[in-house]
Image (cartoon, rainbow, N blue to C red):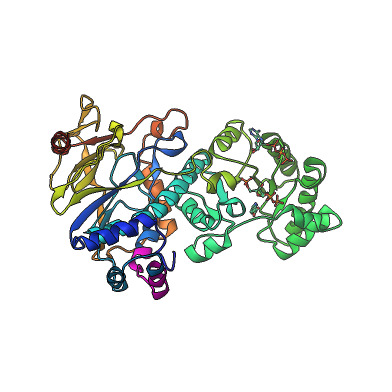
Amino acid sequence: MLARPALYTDYYELTMAQGYYLAGRKDEQACFDYFFRDIPFEGGYVIFAGLSNLLNTLEHFEYHEDELAYLSKEGFRDDFLEYLRNFKLDVDIHAAKEGEVIFPRTPILRVEGSIIETQILETLLLNILNFESLIATKAARMKYAAGDHKVLDFGLRRAQGLGGIQASKAAIIGGVEATSNVYSSFVHNTPASGTMAHSWIQSFDDELTAFRKYAEYYPENCILLVDTYDTLASGVPNAITVAKELEEQGYKMKGIRLDSGDLAYFSRKARRQLDEAGLEYVKIAVSNQLDERLIKSLLSQKAPIDLFGVGTRLVTGHESPALDGVYKLSAIEDEPKLKISENIEKNTLPGRKKVLRYSSNDGTFYGDGILLKNEQDADTIFHPFYPAKHADVTTYNAEPLLQPVMENGDIQIELPSPSQSAAYAQKRLAKLNPEHKRFENPHIYKVGISQKLMDLRDELTKNIK
Ligand SMILES: Nc1ncnc2c1ncn2[C@@H]1O[C@H](COP(=O)(O)OP(=O)(O)OP(=O)(O)O)[C@@H](O)[C@H]1O
Ligand SMILES: O=P(O)(O)OC[C@H]1O[C@H](OP(=O)(O)OP(=O)(O)O)[C@H](O)[C@@H]1O
Ligand SMILES: O=C(O)c1cccnc1
Protein backbone atom coordinates (compact mmCIF):
# COMPACT_ATOMS: atom_id res chain seq x y z
CA MET A 1 0.00 0.00 0.00
CA LEU A 2 1.21 3.47 -0.87
CA ALA A 3 1.80 5.32 2.41
CA ARG A 4 1.07 8.80 1.03
CA PRO A 5 -1.27 8.42 -1.94
CA ALA A 6 -2.75 11.93 -2.20
CA LEU A 7 -0.41 13.17 -4.93
CA TYR A 8 -0.32 9.83 -6.73
CA THR A 9 -2.59 11.29 -9.36
CA ASP A 10 -2.81 13.22 -12.61
CA TYR A 11 -2.58 16.99 -12.46
CA TYR A 12 -6.00 17.45 -14.05
CA GLU A 13 -7.77 15.72 -11.17
CA LEU A 14 -6.52 18.54 -8.95
CA THR A 15 -7.34 21.36 -11.33
CA MET A 16 -10.86 19.97 -11.74
CA ALA A 17 -11.20 19.52 -7.98
CA GLN A 18 -10.17 23.13 -7.43
CA GLY A 19 -12.59 24.17 -10.16
CA TYR A 20 -15.51 22.42 -8.46
CA TYR A 21 -14.47 24.12 -5.23
CA LEU A 22 -14.30 27.57 -6.79
CA ALA A 23 -17.64 27.08 -8.52
CA GLY A 24 -19.25 26.41 -5.14
CA ARG A 25 -20.02 22.83 -6.20
CA LYS A 26 -17.91 20.99 -3.64
CA ASP A 27 -20.86 19.31 -1.93
CA GLU A 28 -22.62 18.18 -5.10
CA GLN A 29 -23.02 14.42 -5.07
CA ALA A 30 -21.58 12.37 -7.92
CA CYS A 31 -21.45 8.75 -8.98
CA PHE A 32 -18.66 7.12 -11.00
CA ASP A 33 -18.41 3.60 -12.44
CA TYR A 34 -15.27 1.52 -12.96
CA PHE A 35 -15.34 -0.90 -15.90
CA PHE A 36 -13.13 -2.04 -18.76
CA ARG A 37 -13.86 -2.53 -22.46
CA ASP A 38 -11.35 -4.99 -23.91
CA ILE A 39 -10.19 -8.26 -22.47
CA PRO A 40 -6.38 -8.51 -22.45
CA PHE A 41 -4.42 -11.43 -23.97
CA GLU A 42 -7.27 -12.01 -26.44
CA GLY A 43 -8.89 -13.86 -23.57
CA GLY A 44 -12.43 -14.50 -22.46
CA TYR A 45 -12.45 -13.02 -18.94
CA VAL A 46 -10.63 -10.85 -16.42
CA ILE A 47 -9.93 -11.52 -12.74
CA PHE A 48 -10.79 -8.53 -10.56
CA ALA A 49 -7.86 -7.69 -8.26
CA GLY A 50 -6.59 -4.69 -6.33
CA LEU A 51 -9.70 -4.03 -4.23
CA SER A 52 -8.05 -4.62 -0.83
CA ASN A 53 -5.12 -2.45 -1.79
CA LEU A 54 -7.45 0.29 -3.01
CA LEU A 55 -9.66 0.30 0.08
CA ASN A 56 -6.66 0.30 2.43
CA THR A 57 -5.10 3.15 0.50
CA LEU A 58 -8.30 5.22 0.45
CA GLU A 59 -8.79 4.82 4.19
CA HIS A 60 -5.45 6.55 4.72
CA PHE A 61 -5.96 9.24 2.12
CA GLU A 62 -4.98 12.70 3.41
CA TYR A 63 -2.87 15.70 2.39
CA HIS A 64 0.35 16.34 4.31
CA GLU A 65 1.85 19.77 4.87
CA ASP A 66 4.74 19.26 2.44
CA GLU A 67 2.28 18.12 -0.22
CA LEU A 68 0.13 21.20 0.32
CA ALA A 69 3.27 23.35 0.10
CA TYR A 70 4.08 21.70 -3.22
CA LEU A 71 0.56 22.38 -4.52
CA SER A 72 0.85 25.98 -3.39
CA LYS A 73 4.08 26.29 -5.38
CA GLU A 74 2.22 24.83 -8.35
CA GLY A 75 -0.25 27.69 -8.14
CA PHE A 76 -3.19 26.14 -6.31
CA ARG A 77 -5.13 28.68 -4.24
CA ASP A 78 -4.87 29.04 -0.50
CA ASP A 79 -8.58 28.60 0.15
CA PHE A 80 -8.62 25.35 -1.85
CA LEU A 81 -5.50 24.13 -0.06
CA GLU A 82 -7.15 24.90 3.27
CA TYR A 83 -10.05 22.73 2.12
CA LEU A 84 -7.60 19.94 1.24
CA ARG A 85 -5.85 20.34 4.63
CA ASN A 86 -8.99 19.07 6.36
CA PHE A 87 -9.88 16.63 3.61
CA LYS A 88 -11.02 13.11 4.46
CA LEU A 89 -12.55 10.79 1.92
CA ASP A 90 -16.17 10.28 2.80
CA VAL A 91 -17.15 8.11 -0.14
CA ASP A 92 -19.40 5.07 -0.47
CA ILE A 93 -18.12 2.26 -2.67
CA HIS A 94 -19.92 -0.80 -3.95
CA ALA A 95 -17.78 -3.43 -5.62
CA ALA A 96 -17.52 -7.01 -6.77
CA LYS A 97 -15.40 -9.29 -4.58
CA GLU A 98 -11.68 -9.43 -5.16
CA GLY A 99 -11.02 -12.49 -7.32
CA GLU A 100 -14.37 -12.17 -9.14
CA VAL A 101 -14.46 -13.21 -12.79
CA ILE A 102 -15.48 -10.08 -14.68
CA PHE A 103 -16.36 -9.06 -18.21
CA PRO A 104 -16.30 -6.00 -20.48
CA ARG A 105 -18.62 -3.09 -19.74
CA THR A 106 -19.87 -4.46 -16.44
CA PRO A 107 -19.54 -1.68 -13.82
CA ILE A 108 -17.93 -3.79 -11.15
CA LEU A 109 -17.21 -0.89 -8.85
CA ARG A 110 -19.26 2.23 -8.11
CA VAL A 111 -18.06 5.26 -6.16
CA GLU A 112 -20.50 7.79 -4.69
CA GLY A 113 -19.66 10.94 -2.79
CA SER A 114 -18.99 14.61 -3.34
CA ILE A 115 -17.88 15.57 -6.83
CA ILE A 116 -14.45 16.59 -5.53
CA GLU A 117 -13.65 13.42 -3.66
CA THR A 118 -15.03 11.06 -6.30
CA GLN A 119 -13.03 12.89 -8.98
CA ILE A 120 -9.82 13.19 -7.04
CA LEU A 121 -9.38 9.46 -6.55
CA GLU A 122 -9.82 8.51 -10.23
CA THR A 123 -6.20 8.05 -11.23
CA LEU A 124 -5.20 6.26 -8.04
CA LEU A 125 -8.13 3.86 -8.36
CA LEU A 126 -7.45 3.11 -12.02
CA ASN A 127 -3.75 2.62 -11.44
CA ILE A 128 -4.33 0.05 -8.71
CA LEU A 129 -7.26 -1.87 -10.20
CA ASN A 130 -6.06 -1.94 -13.79
CA PHE A 131 -2.61 -3.28 -13.02
CA GLU A 132 -3.52 -5.83 -10.39
CA SER A 133 -6.43 -7.14 -12.47
CA LEU A 134 -4.18 -7.43 -15.52
CA ILE A 135 -1.58 -9.52 -13.72
CA ALA A 136 -4.14 -11.62 -11.84
CA THR A 137 -5.71 -12.41 -15.21
CA LYS A 138 -2.37 -13.43 -16.73
CA ALA A 139 -1.65 -15.62 -13.72
CA ALA A 140 -5.10 -17.24 -13.96
CA ARG A 141 -4.42 -18.12 -17.58
CA MET A 142 -1.09 -19.68 -16.67
CA LYS A 143 -2.66 -21.65 -13.83
CA TYR A 144 -5.44 -22.79 -16.17
CA ALA A 145 -2.84 -24.08 -18.62
CA ALA A 146 -0.86 -25.76 -15.83
CA GLY A 147 -3.89 -27.55 -14.32
CA ASP A 148 -2.80 -29.49 -11.25
CA HIS A 149 0.85 -28.61 -11.81
CA LYS A 150 2.24 -25.81 -9.70
CA VAL A 151 3.17 -22.35 -11.03
CA LEU A 152 5.75 -20.17 -9.27
CA ASP A 153 6.33 -16.46 -9.86
CA PHE A 154 9.99 -15.63 -10.68
CA GLY A 155 9.30 -12.18 -12.15
CA LEU A 156 10.62 -9.49 -9.81
CA ARG A 157 13.96 -8.96 -11.56
CA ARG A 158 12.25 -8.19 -14.86
CA ALA A 159 9.18 -6.43 -13.52
CA GLN A 160 8.44 -2.82 -14.32
CA GLY A 161 10.15 -1.25 -11.32
CA LEU A 162 8.28 -1.29 -8.04
CA GLY A 163 5.22 -2.60 -9.89
CA GLY A 164 6.82 -5.96 -9.21
CA ILE A 165 5.56 -5.79 -5.62
CA GLN A 166 1.92 -5.56 -6.69
CA ALA A 167 2.46 -7.92 -9.61
CA SER A 168 3.62 -10.76 -7.38
CA LYS A 169 0.63 -10.30 -5.09
CA ALA A 170 -1.81 -10.12 -8.00
CA ALA A 171 -0.21 -13.27 -9.44
CA ILE A 172 -1.10 -15.09 -6.22
CA ILE A 173 -4.71 -13.88 -6.52
CA GLY A 174 -4.76 -15.22 -10.08
CA GLY A 175 -3.64 -18.69 -9.02
CA VAL A 176 0.15 -18.81 -8.82
CA GLU A 177 1.15 -20.90 -5.78
CA ALA A 178 4.17 -18.96 -4.50
CA THR A 179 6.57 -16.17 -5.35
CA SER A 180 10.32 -15.68 -5.36
CA ASN A 181 9.59 -12.03 -4.45
CA VAL A 182 10.57 -11.78 -0.80
CA TYR A 183 9.36 -8.20 -0.34
CA SER A 184 5.92 -9.00 -1.71
CA SER A 185 5.73 -12.17 0.37
CA PHE A 186 6.65 -10.14 3.48
CA VAL A 187 4.18 -7.30 2.99
CA HIS A 188 1.32 -9.40 1.64
CA ASN A 189 1.87 -12.52 3.71
CA THR A 190 2.01 -14.77 0.64
CA PRO A 191 4.09 -17.97 0.28
CA ALA A 192 7.73 -17.48 -0.78
CA SER A 193 9.69 -20.10 -2.64
CA GLY A 194 12.64 -20.63 -4.98
CA THR A 195 15.53 -22.73 -6.21
CA MET A 196 19.08 -21.55 -6.98
CA ALA A 197 20.90 -19.51 -9.65
CA HIS A 198 23.62 -20.62 -12.07
CA SER A 199 26.04 -18.39 -10.14
CA TRP A 200 25.88 -20.73 -7.12
CA ILE A 201 27.09 -23.61 -9.25
CA GLN A 202 29.65 -21.52 -11.17
CA SER A 203 31.10 -20.24 -7.89
CA PHE A 204 32.32 -23.74 -6.95
CA ASP A 205 35.11 -25.66 -8.65
CA ASP A 206 32.68 -28.30 -9.79
CA GLU A 207 28.94 -28.89 -10.06
CA LEU A 208 28.80 -31.87 -7.68
CA THR A 209 30.39 -29.88 -4.86
CA ALA A 210 27.94 -27.02 -5.49
CA PHE A 211 24.97 -29.42 -5.29
CA ARG A 212 26.33 -31.15 -2.18
CA LYS A 213 26.82 -27.88 -0.33
CA TYR A 214 23.32 -26.69 -1.13
CA ALA A 215 21.86 -30.02 -0.04
CA GLU A 216 23.87 -29.86 3.18
CA TYR A 217 22.30 -26.51 4.12
CA TYR A 218 18.83 -27.13 2.70
CA PRO A 219 18.23 -30.88 2.84
CA GLU A 220 14.46 -30.46 3.02
CA ASN A 221 14.13 -27.78 0.41
CA CYS A 222 16.57 -28.74 -2.27
CA ILE A 223 15.83 -28.05 -5.95
CA LEU A 224 19.04 -28.29 -7.98
CA LEU A 225 19.56 -26.35 -11.21
CA VAL A 226 20.93 -28.94 -13.61
CA ASP A 227 21.68 -27.07 -16.84
CA THR A 228 24.82 -25.06 -16.06
CA TYR A 229 27.28 -27.32 -17.92
CA ASP A 230 25.64 -30.35 -19.50
CA THR A 231 22.14 -31.27 -18.40
CA LEU A 232 22.05 -34.97 -19.17
CA ALA A 233 25.76 -35.88 -18.91
CA SER A 234 26.53 -33.92 -15.77
CA GLY A 235 23.63 -31.97 -14.17
CA VAL A 236 21.09 -34.78 -13.75
CA PRO A 237 23.69 -37.48 -12.81
CA ASN A 238 25.16 -35.15 -10.15
CA ALA A 239 21.68 -34.37 -8.84
CA ILE A 240 21.01 -38.12 -8.61
CA THR A 241 24.20 -38.62 -6.62
CA VAL A 242 23.18 -35.91 -4.17
CA ALA A 243 19.59 -37.22 -3.92
CA LYS A 244 20.96 -40.64 -2.99
CA GLU A 245 23.24 -39.09 -0.36
CA LEU A 246 20.24 -37.23 1.05
CA GLU A 247 18.26 -40.48 1.17
CA GLU A 248 21.03 -41.97 3.34
CA GLN A 249 20.47 -39.09 5.76
CA GLY A 250 16.70 -39.65 5.72
CA TYR A 251 15.78 -36.77 3.38
CA LYS A 252 13.96 -36.67 0.07
CA MET A 253 15.33 -34.23 -2.46
CA LYS A 254 12.57 -31.98 -3.74
CA GLY A 255 13.51 -31.55 -7.36
CA ILE A 256 15.64 -30.41 -10.24
CA ARG A 257 15.19 -27.34 -12.44
CA LEU A 258 15.73 -27.08 -16.19
CA ASP A 259 16.21 -23.55 -17.52
CA SER A 260 17.26 -23.99 -21.15
CA GLY A 261 16.99 -26.08 -24.26
CA ASP A 262 14.03 -28.12 -25.40
CA LEU A 263 12.18 -28.47 -22.13
CA ALA A 264 10.04 -31.39 -23.37
CA TYR A 265 13.07 -33.35 -24.51
CA PHE A 266 15.18 -32.63 -21.45
CA SER A 267 12.37 -33.20 -18.97
CA ARG A 268 11.61 -36.60 -20.56
CA LYS A 269 15.26 -37.64 -20.51
CA ALA A 270 15.78 -36.33 -16.98
CA ARG A 271 12.61 -38.09 -15.76
CA ARG A 272 13.87 -41.37 -17.16
CA GLN A 273 17.28 -40.97 -15.50
CA LEU A 274 15.69 -40.07 -12.17
CA ASP A 275 13.19 -42.94 -12.34
CA GLU A 276 15.89 -45.44 -13.26
CA ALA A 277 17.71 -44.33 -10.13
CA GLY A 278 14.55 -44.98 -8.06
CA LEU A 279 13.92 -41.26 -7.59
CA GLU A 280 10.34 -41.11 -8.81
CA TYR A 281 9.50 -38.61 -6.08
CA VAL A 282 12.01 -35.99 -7.32
CA LYS A 283 10.04 -33.31 -9.12
CA ILE A 284 10.98 -31.53 -12.33
CA ALA A 285 10.71 -27.76 -12.45
CA VAL A 286 11.21 -25.75 -15.64
CA SER A 287 11.67 -22.09 -16.49
CA ASN A 288 12.76 -19.97 -19.46
CA GLN A 289 10.46 -17.32 -20.88
CA LEU A 290 7.35 -19.37 -20.21
CA ASP A 291 3.78 -18.21 -20.62
CA GLU A 292 0.36 -19.87 -20.69
CA ARG A 293 0.71 -20.98 -24.30
CA LEU A 294 4.12 -22.60 -23.74
CA ILE A 295 2.91 -24.27 -20.56
CA LYS A 296 -0.03 -25.67 -22.50
CA SER A 297 2.25 -26.73 -25.34
CA LEU A 298 4.71 -28.48 -23.03
CA LEU A 299 1.93 -30.39 -21.29
CA SER A 300 0.38 -31.35 -24.61
CA GLN A 301 3.81 -32.69 -25.62
CA LYS A 302 3.44 -34.89 -22.50
CA ALA A 303 6.51 -33.35 -20.93
CA PRO A 304 6.78 -34.82 -17.41
CA ILE A 305 6.98 -31.42 -15.73
CA ASP A 306 5.67 -30.82 -12.21
CA LEU A 307 6.34 -27.17 -11.66
CA PHE A 308 6.53 -24.12 -13.89
CA GLY A 309 8.59 -21.06 -12.91
CA VAL A 310 7.36 -17.98 -14.77
CA GLY A 311 8.85 -14.53 -14.65
CA THR A 312 8.94 -11.88 -17.35
CA ARG A 313 5.79 -12.79 -19.21
CA LEU A 314 3.75 -12.97 -16.02
CA VAL A 315 4.68 -9.78 -14.21
CA THR A 316 4.81 -7.60 -17.33
CA GLY A 317 1.44 -8.84 -18.60
CA HIS A 318 3.22 -9.90 -21.74
CA GLU A 319 1.44 -9.14 -25.00
CA SER A 320 -1.22 -6.91 -23.36
CA PRO A 321 0.65 -4.32 -21.34
CA ALA A 322 -2.41 -2.71 -19.77
CA LEU A 323 -6.01 -3.34 -18.83
CA ASP A 324 -8.04 -0.49 -20.32
CA GLY A 325 -10.24 0.01 -17.23
CA VAL A 326 -11.95 3.42 -17.09
CA TYR A 327 -13.78 5.49 -14.48
CA LYS A 328 -16.80 7.29 -15.88
CA LEU A 329 -19.25 9.76 -14.39
CA SER A 330 -22.77 8.32 -14.37
CA ALA A 331 -24.75 10.75 -12.20
CA ILE A 332 -24.65 14.17 -10.57
CA GLU A 333 -27.07 14.38 -7.66
CA ASP A 334 -30.07 12.42 -9.00
CA GLU A 335 -29.48 13.33 -12.60
CA PRO A 336 -28.08 10.53 -14.74
CA LYS A 337 -25.13 11.55 -16.91
CA LEU A 338 -23.97 10.15 -20.20
CA LYS A 339 -20.94 10.43 -22.41
CA ILE A 340 -21.43 10.06 -26.14
CA SER A 341 -18.61 9.00 -28.37
CA GLU A 342 -17.97 8.87 -32.08
CA ASN A 343 -17.44 5.21 -31.44
CA ILE A 344 -20.81 3.88 -30.28
CA GLU A 345 -19.05 1.21 -28.20
CA LYS A 346 -17.58 3.99 -26.08
CA ASN A 347 -20.93 5.52 -25.09
CA THR A 348 -21.35 5.19 -21.33
CA LEU A 349 -24.28 3.84 -19.34
CA PRO A 350 -26.06 6.54 -17.30
CA GLY A 351 -27.38 6.47 -13.75
CA ARG A 352 -26.71 4.49 -10.60
CA LYS A 353 -26.62 0.85 -11.59
CA LYS A 354 -26.32 -2.64 -10.24
CA VAL A 355 -25.07 -5.87 -11.75
CA LEU A 356 -26.78 -9.24 -11.62
CA ARG A 357 -24.99 -12.43 -12.55
CA TYR A 358 -27.28 -15.04 -14.03
CA SER A 359 -26.44 -18.69 -13.47
CA SER A 360 -28.01 -22.04 -14.36
CA ASN A 361 -29.22 -24.31 -11.60
CA ASP A 362 -25.92 -26.19 -11.70
CA GLY A 363 -24.13 -22.89 -10.92
CA THR A 364 -22.68 -22.28 -14.40
CA PHE A 365 -22.49 -18.58 -15.27
CA TYR A 366 -24.83 -17.64 -18.11
CA GLY A 367 -24.37 -13.87 -18.38
CA ASP A 368 -24.36 -10.54 -16.55
CA GLY A 369 -27.18 -8.02 -16.52
CA ILE A 370 -26.64 -4.31 -15.90
CA LEU A 371 -29.76 -2.75 -14.40
CA LEU A 372 -30.70 0.55 -12.85
CA LYS A 373 -30.05 0.36 -9.13
CA ASN A 374 -33.70 0.60 -8.17
CA GLU A 375 -34.90 -2.10 -10.56
CA GLN A 376 -35.78 -5.39 -8.93
CA ASP A 377 -34.89 -7.76 -11.72
CA ALA A 378 -35.14 -7.99 -15.50
CA ASP A 379 -36.75 -10.60 -17.70
CA THR A 380 -34.60 -9.82 -20.69
CA ILE A 381 -31.13 -8.41 -21.13
CA PHE A 382 -30.18 -6.60 -24.33
CA HIS A 383 -26.85 -6.31 -26.04
CA PRO A 384 -25.72 -2.76 -25.14
CA PHE A 385 -25.30 -1.68 -28.78
CA TYR A 386 -27.22 -4.21 -30.83
CA PRO A 387 -30.54 -4.61 -28.96
CA ALA A 388 -31.84 -7.05 -31.56
CA LYS A 389 -29.55 -9.43 -29.74
CA HIS A 390 -31.21 -10.16 -26.43
CA ALA A 391 -31.62 -13.00 -23.99
CA ASP A 392 -34.43 -14.17 -21.76
CA VAL A 393 -33.01 -14.54 -18.24
CA THR A 394 -36.18 -15.56 -16.40
CA THR A 395 -35.06 -19.17 -15.93
CA TYR A 396 -31.68 -18.26 -14.42
CA ASN A 397 -30.72 -17.53 -10.83
CA ALA A 398 -29.75 -13.89 -10.33
CA GLU A 399 -26.94 -12.99 -7.97
CA PRO A 400 -26.07 -9.35 -7.15
CA LEU A 401 -22.39 -8.82 -7.89
CA LEU A 402 -21.76 -5.57 -6.04
CA GLN A 403 -21.65 -5.29 -2.27
CA PRO A 404 -21.05 -2.26 -0.05
CA VAL A 405 -17.31 -2.21 0.69
CA MET A 406 -16.84 1.37 1.92
CA GLU A 407 -19.28 3.70 3.63
CA ASN A 408 -18.43 7.31 4.47
CA GLY A 409 -14.79 6.47 3.85
CA ASP A 410 -14.75 3.49 6.24
CA ILE A 411 -14.09 -0.06 5.06
CA GLN A 412 -17.19 -2.23 5.53
CA ILE A 413 -15.80 -5.69 4.85
CA GLU A 414 -13.08 -7.87 6.25
CA LEU A 415 -10.41 -7.42 3.60
CA PRO A 416 -9.57 -10.79 2.05
CA SER A 417 -5.97 -11.98 2.05
CA PRO A 418 -4.46 -12.70 -1.38
CA SER A 419 -4.86 -16.43 -0.79
CA GLN A 420 -8.53 -15.99 0.16
CA SER A 421 -9.07 -13.99 -3.04
CA ALA A 422 -7.20 -16.69 -4.95
CA ALA A 423 -9.52 -19.37 -3.57
CA TYR A 424 -12.52 -17.24 -4.54
CA ALA A 425 -11.15 -16.71 -8.06
CA GLN A 426 -10.71 -20.46 -8.57
CA LYS A 427 -14.21 -21.13 -7.21
CA ARG A 428 -15.70 -18.61 -9.63
CA LEU A 429 -13.58 -19.73 -12.60
CA ALA A 430 -14.90 -23.24 -12.04
CA LYS A 431 -18.38 -21.87 -12.83
CA LEU A 432 -17.26 -20.37 -16.12
CA ASN A 433 -17.71 -22.59 -19.16
CA PRO A 434 -14.45 -23.81 -20.74
CA GLU A 435 -15.31 -22.11 -24.03
CA HIS A 436 -14.78 -18.74 -22.28
CA LYS A 437 -11.44 -19.91 -20.90
CA ARG A 438 -9.79 -21.30 -24.02
CA PHE A 439 -6.92 -19.28 -25.47
CA GLU A 440 -7.98 -19.31 -29.10
CA ASN A 441 -11.08 -17.27 -30.01
CA PRO A 442 -12.80 -17.67 -26.66
CA HIS A 443 -16.57 -17.52 -26.74
CA ILE A 444 -17.89 -14.08 -25.81
CA TYR A 445 -19.67 -13.99 -22.45
CA LYS A 446 -23.08 -12.30 -22.47
CA VAL A 447 -23.27 -8.89 -20.85
CA GLY A 448 -26.58 -7.12 -21.37
CA ILE A 449 -28.53 -4.14 -20.12
CA SER A 450 -32.11 -3.95 -18.91
CA GLN A 451 -34.91 -2.39 -20.93
CA LYS A 452 -35.17 0.48 -18.41
CA LEU A 453 -31.48 1.27 -18.60
CA MET A 454 -31.57 1.11 -22.39
CA ASP A 455 -34.60 3.46 -22.46
CA LEU A 456 -32.87 5.91 -20.13
CA ARG A 457 -29.72 5.89 -22.22
CA ASP A 458 -31.61 6.34 -25.48
CA GLU A 459 -33.73 9.15 -24.04
CA LEU A 460 -30.68 11.02 -22.77
CA THR A 461 -28.87 10.49 -26.06
CA LYS A 462 -31.83 11.93 -27.97
CA ASN A 463 -31.95 14.99 -25.69
CA ILE A 464 -28.24 15.65 -26.08
CA LYS A 465 -28.39 15.37 -29.83
N1 LIG B 1 9.47 -28.36 -26.14
C1 LIG B 1 9.23 -27.06 -26.25
N2 LIG B 1 8.14 -26.65 -26.89
C2 LIG B 1 7.87 -25.35 -27.03
N3 LIG B 1 8.64 -24.38 -26.54
C3 LIG B 1 9.75 -24.71 -25.86
C4 LIG B 1 10.09 -26.07 -25.70
N4 LIG B 1 11.22 -26.10 -25.00
C5 LIG B 1 11.58 -24.83 -24.74
N5 LIG B 1 10.70 -23.99 -25.25
C6 LIG B 1 10.68 -22.52 -25.19
O1 LIG B 1 11.45 -22.03 -26.28
C7 LIG B 1 12.22 -20.94 -25.89
C8 LIG B 1 13.68 -21.35 -26.01
O2 LIG B 1 14.38 -20.31 -26.48
P1 LIG B 1 15.93 -20.41 -26.71
O3 LIG B 1 16.24 -21.55 -27.61
O4 LIG B 1 16.39 -19.06 -27.07
O5 LIG B 1 16.41 -20.73 -25.25
P2 LIG B 1 17.53 -21.65 -24.74
O6 LIG B 1 17.55 -22.95 -25.46
O7 LIG B 1 17.31 -21.73 -23.30
O8 LIG B 1 18.80 -20.84 -24.98
P3 LIG B 1 19.69 -20.17 -23.89
O9 LIG B 1 20.74 -21.19 -23.59
O10 LIG B 1 20.18 -18.96 -24.57
O11 LIG B 1 18.85 -19.86 -22.68
C9 LIG B 1 11.85 -20.61 -24.45
O12 LIG B 1 10.82 -19.66 -24.39
C10 LIG B 1 11.37 -21.97 -23.95
O13 LIG B 1 10.49 -21.87 -22.85
O1 LIG C 1 12.48 -16.50 -18.05
P1 LIG C 1 11.56 -15.91 -17.08
O2 LIG C 1 10.15 -16.37 -17.28
O3 LIG C 1 11.69 -14.42 -16.97
O4 LIG C 1 11.92 -16.54 -15.61
C1 LIG C 1 12.92 -16.08 -14.78
C2 LIG C 1 14.30 -16.36 -15.32
O5 LIG C 1 15.17 -15.64 -14.49
C3 LIG C 1 16.28 -16.46 -14.20
O6 LIG C 1 17.27 -16.31 -15.16
P2 LIG C 1 18.51 -15.34 -15.00
O7 LIG C 1 19.30 -15.52 -16.22
O8 LIG C 1 18.09 -13.96 -14.62
O9 LIG C 1 19.28 -15.89 -13.72
P3 LIG C 1 19.96 -17.31 -13.47
O10 LIG C 1 21.41 -17.08 -13.56
O11 LIG C 1 19.51 -17.69 -12.14
O12 LIG C 1 19.46 -18.24 -14.53
C4 LIG C 1 15.71 -17.87 -14.21
O13 LIG C 1 16.69 -18.81 -14.39
C5 LIG C 1 14.69 -17.83 -15.29
O14 LIG C 1 15.21 -18.23 -16.51
O1 LIG D 1 14.18 -19.34 -7.38
C1 LIG D 1 14.41 -19.40 -8.59
O2 LIG D 1 14.69 -20.46 -9.17
C2 LIG D 1 14.38 -18.14 -9.40
C3 LIG D 1 14.11 -16.93 -8.84
C4 LIG D 1 14.09 -15.80 -9.62
C5 LIG D 1 14.31 -15.89 -10.95
N1 LIG D 1 14.58 -17.08 -11.52
C6 LIG D 1 14.61 -18.20 -10.75
Q: Is residue 405 visible?
A: no
Mark count? 0
* Residue that protrudes farthest toward the top in the picture: 388
Q: Is residue 26 left or right of residue 191?
A: left
Q: Is residue 316 left or right of residue 404?
A: right
In the rendered image, the vertical position of residue 73 relative to residue 252, given as above or below: below
Depth order, front residue of 450/223: 450
* 227 in magenta: no
Image x and y of residue 285, in percent: 64, 46
Q: Residue at x 66, y 61 (%)?
A: 220
Q: Residue at x 82, y 54 (%)?
A: 208
Rendered-image quadrant of the C terminus: top left
Image x and y of residue 136, in percent: 45, 48
- Magenta-colored span: 56-71
In the rendered image, the vertical position of residue 217 relative to residue 106, given as above or below: below
Q: Is residue 42 left or right of residue 90?
A: right
Depth order, front residue of 151/187: 187
